[in-house]
């Protein structure tokens, strides 16, 4: 089943817009006509890149959706009325269609969590489970408020990491472009001069000139090789074995940053789930799923088993030998005082702050390393040219 957005008119001439689930466009038209409206614009779901892009855009609208729904439910409005208002004010066409689909499912008898579950690419499992726990406890507005805090914290952390990577990325791009320009446009001019003089050049100059001529003549082969290599590496990383090896390598290179990031992510997710009334075993499975590094997730596989055997959370976490000692001590205190959910959220806050400092230190080390690497490459090229010029000047007149 796919979601089709439509524009139609009633027999009274009133134009209506919305979304409908159907197997194909013809089935969507038949369903609309059976409701008494006349469709005049049916938009089929977009495929390929544009479809993936629209899904990502919808994911970005989850925070807005949760904030608005939490505010409306907190004001005492019923769920269906709240969803109807959100669908009317939504600026995203994709999100509007999704909300209308959810509203339709609810009016047909489905629960809110079951309606959300029909859109797994937009609403992750953790979101659905927290909503289900809120429905069961009759505290959906409170759970949505906690979900809102969780999504805001996750977005803030993600935005901080992305903004920190912008400057190093610009350094690499500009440095790479400068080197390519020197090799393909500047050096060939010198090679013509050196060839006319006919003097013996230093070895470093010969190497640079050879590389420059090869790059200029066979740049398309180099580009093809890089593209093919990138494709093969990305394809391998998507496999279970490749993803594990890649994540293990990242863990070795950036252990401090990754451990703090995964500690904050795991503890905030687990603390939010427990505070929302989700059972511990289910919460552990959901919290482990949000960990992006497979090497860390693999080390935490035994957590549900340990909790099921009555070992609690602190002991299995210590056995995994992944999380920092401070986090383990705080989790243990939370278990002993019966405030595990609160303590987990404090651990998350602590390590989110620590993560920002770790990222700052890592970038403070990475940026000069990039600058030094680019300076060495460009310096070697310039020095090789100058050595050749000096050798020419030393020729007897």
Image (spheres, helix red, strand yellow):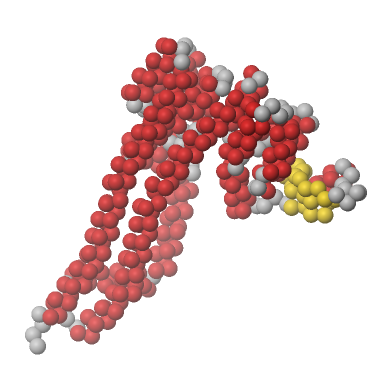
Q: Is residue 27 left or right of residue 175?
A: right
Q: Quadrant of the C terminus?
A: bottom left
Most distant residue in the bottom direction: 397
Q: Which residue sits at x=50%, y=33%?
A: 290
Q: Looking at the image, which residue is at 28% across and 46% down?
A: 365
Task: Determine whether 203 is above or below 271 in the image.
Answer: below
Q: Residue drawn 49% across and 36% down?
A: 154
**In the image, residue 322 lies at what x, y percent?**
36, 27
Which image quadrant for residue 32? top right
Q: Residue furthest right?
A: 11
Query: Where residue 97 sits in the image (x, y, percent)?
Result: 71, 44
Q: Position of residue 126 (x, y in %)?
A: 56, 30
Quadrant of the rendered image containing residue 144? top right
Q: Is residue 1 visible?
A: no
Q: Is residue 15 depicted above or below 246 in this figure?
A: below
Horizontal and vertical percent position of residue 313: 44, 18
Return the residue nearer the eye: 74 or 264. Answer: 74
Number of callouts? 0
Viewer-nearest residue: 204 or 340? 340
- For the view shown, which residue lies furthest in the front direction? 75
Residue 118 versus residue 188 in the image, above or below: above
Query: Which quarter of the rendering shows the N terminus?
Result: top right
Q: Residue at x 46, y 36 (%)?
A: 292
Residue 246 seen in render: yes
């Amino acid at each position: 089943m796919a979601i089709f957005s439509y524009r139609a008119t009633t027999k009274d001439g009133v134009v209506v817009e919305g979304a409908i689930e159907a197997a194909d466009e013809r089935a969507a038209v038949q369903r609309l006509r059976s409701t008494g409206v006349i469709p005049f614009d049916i938009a089929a779901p977009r495929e390929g890149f544009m479809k993936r892009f629209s899904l990502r855009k919808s994911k970005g609208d989850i925070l807005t959706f949760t904030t608005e729904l939490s505010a409306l439910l907190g004001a005492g409005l019923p769920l269906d009325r709240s969803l109807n208002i959100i669908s009317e004010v939504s600026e995203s066409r994709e999100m509007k269609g999704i909300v209308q689909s959810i509203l339709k499912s609810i009016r047909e008898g489905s629960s809110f969590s079951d309606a959300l579950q029909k859109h797994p690419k937009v609403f992750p499992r953790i979101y659905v489970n927290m909503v289900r726990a809120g429905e069961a406890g009759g505290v959906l507005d409170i759970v949505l408020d906690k979900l809102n805090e969780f999504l805001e914290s996750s977005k803030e952390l993600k935005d901080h990491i992305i903004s920190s990577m912008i400057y190093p990325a610009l350094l690499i791009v500009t440095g790479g472009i400068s080197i390519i320009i020197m090799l393909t446009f500047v050096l060939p001019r010198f090679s013509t001069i050196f060839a006319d003089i006919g003097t013996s050049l230093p070895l470093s100059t010969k190497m640079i000139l050879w590389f420059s001529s090869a790059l200029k003549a066979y740049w398309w082969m180099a580009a093809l090789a890089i593209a093919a290599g990138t494709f093969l590496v990305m394809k391998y990383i998507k496999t279970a074995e490749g993803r594990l090896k890649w994540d293990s390598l990242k863990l070795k290179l950036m252990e401090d940053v990754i451990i703090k990031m995964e500690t904050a992510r795991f503890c905030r997710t687990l603390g939010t789930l427990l505070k929302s009334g989700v059972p511990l075993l289910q919460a552990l499975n959901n919290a482990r799923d949000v960990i992006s590094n497979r090497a860390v997730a693999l080390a935490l596989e035994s957590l549900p088993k340990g909790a099921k055997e009555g070992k609690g959370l602190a002991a299995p976490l210590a056995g995994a030998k992944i999380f920092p000692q401070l986090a383990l001590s705080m989790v243990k205190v939370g278990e002993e005082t019966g405030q595990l959910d609160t303590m987990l959220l404090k651990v998350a806050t602590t390590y989110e702050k620590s993560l920002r400092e770790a990222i700052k230190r890592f970038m403070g080390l990475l940026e000069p390393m990039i600058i030094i690497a680019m300076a060495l490459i460009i310096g070697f090229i310039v020095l090789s040219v100058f050595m050749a010029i000096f050798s020419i000047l030393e020729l007897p007149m």
